[in-house]
Amino acid sequence: MFYNNQMYLDWVKDCKAIGIKAHFVPGLMPILGYDRFKRSIGFCKTNVPQSLTDALEPLKADDEKVRNFGVEFGVKQCQELMEGGCRFLHFYTMNLEAATIKIIEGLGIMNKSKQLPFQQSNERKSEDVRPIFWAIKP
């Protein structure tokens, strides 16, 4: 998981320069909320460009603005990565696929004729039993 594309692209270039021939798949986590973002980057010790921190700071009190910004940032991040040679993208959805779907739609690569490899969250409303880790979610 990262938010600094240049650092990732340089790392891939360095790996290839020393002879590593593996496929590299960037792991991307959409920004779903300010507090969640700060916790995630803290847990993972993720390098975050100052420009991203500066852009999020004035939005932090408005969850909807943060989510919208997260989608916009995600689209730009993916476009840069694809332009930098990434053929594949891996999204950490954390069981919240809405932002990922919006990013994929924003990239213009959503194939609506194919079924998604997961059930969308509107199906969860009819469940009678919930796993314990969902207890904090409405």
Image (tube, rainbow, N blue to C red):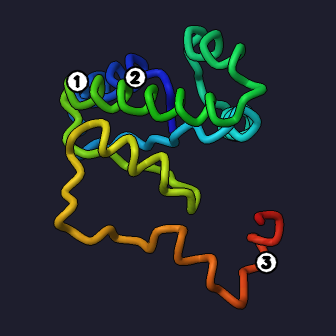
Query: Which numbered disc covers residue 68?
Result: none
Query: Which numbered disc covers residue 132?
Result: 3
In-front residue for pair 83/124: 124
Whole-Å distance between the Cαs marked 1 and 2? Answer: 9 Å
**Image spot of residue 105 (x, y percent):** 30, 44
Q: Residue at 21%, 40% (x, y): give it.
A: 108
Q: Residue at 67%, 32% (x, y): give it.
A: 45
In the figure, 78 relative to 49: above or below?
below
Q: Mark 3 or 1 closer to N-term?
A: 1
Q: Identify the residue position indicated by label 1 in the image.
A: 84
Q: Identify the residue position indicated by label 2 in the image.
A: 5
Whole-Å distance between the Cαs marked 3 and 1? Answer: 41 Å
Q: Mark 2 or 3 closer to N-term?
A: 2
Kind of residue sitting beneath label 2 = Asn
| For residue 53, side relative to residue 110 (left or right) | right
Task: Point out the residue furthest to the right here.
Answer: 136
Whole-Å distance between the Cαs marked 2 and 3? Answer: 36 Å
